[in-house]
Image (cartoon, grey):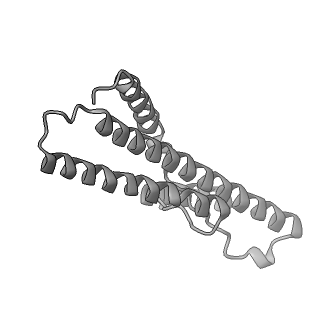
Amino acid sequence: MESPDLETVEKARALVEEIIAGRSPMAAAVPYFAPTDIGCLTPARQEAESRIQEENDFGNRLRAAIQMSLAAAAASLRVSESLMQDFAQLSLPERQKQLARCACDAQACRDIAGHVAPILSGKEAPKLDALMEIKRLKSAIYERFGRWPGG
């Protein structure tokens, strides 16, 4: 069945995918590198380190949840697009195959969205990006020791 809403759904999916593409470089989790001598720091410095870690964790969970929510939305819109296509010219077995594919895609949407709540609640950690780990480590070394690694 050809739907007059198909064009609107296609535009919505394209917009969501554009947002995802723009956010992708910012989506990876940034690791926190605690000082190895935290027990020797003053209480004020320990408190500051605790706040840095909490802010880092909050930012990571928020970035991951936004990216995953957008990914689930885009995938769901792709399923809607598929279902709005004109199936009249397809044979019954082809229709069944198309619907089975849509069912698998819908389950993938559910699975993606299913990770958002555990990430937001802190039960699941967002994945770390190795490049960001290296950048963060370098800045942590500079911040603590006043020099760049290797310098």
Would residue 148 be visible to someone looking at this image?
no
* Quarter residue 55 falls in: bottom right
Quadrant the N terminus occupies: top left
* Quarter residue 112 falls in: bottom left
Total numbered circles:
0
Would residue 41 be visible to someone looking at this image?
yes
From the viewer's side, name the closer residue of 32 and 79. Answer: 79
Report x, y in % for residue 60: 59, 55
| Relative to 87, 61 lies left or right | right
| Relative to 120, 14 lies left or right | left
From the viewer's side, name the closer residue of 128 and 125. Answer: 125
The residue at 56%/46% (across/down) is: 66
**Residue located farthest toward the bottom when viewing the structure as drawn:** 39
| Relative to 137, 15 lies left or right | left
The residue at 64%/58% (across/down) is: 120
From the viewer's side, name the closer residue of 99 and 132. Answer: 99
Please tell me whether residue 33 is drawn above or below residue 96 in the rendered image: below
Report x, y in % for residue 63: 57, 49
Please tell me whether residue 126 is drawn above or below residue 65 in the rendered image: below
The residue at 49%/52% (across/down) is: 28
Please tell me whether residue 100 is drawn above or below residue 118 in the rendered image: above
* Quarter residue 146 falls in: bottom right
Report x, y in % for residue 36: 67, 75
Please tell me whether residue 125 is drawn above or below residue 74 in the rendered image: below
**Residue located farthest toward the right when viewing the structure as drawn:** 43
Report x, y in % for residue 46: 81, 68
The residue at 50%/54% (across/down) is: 113
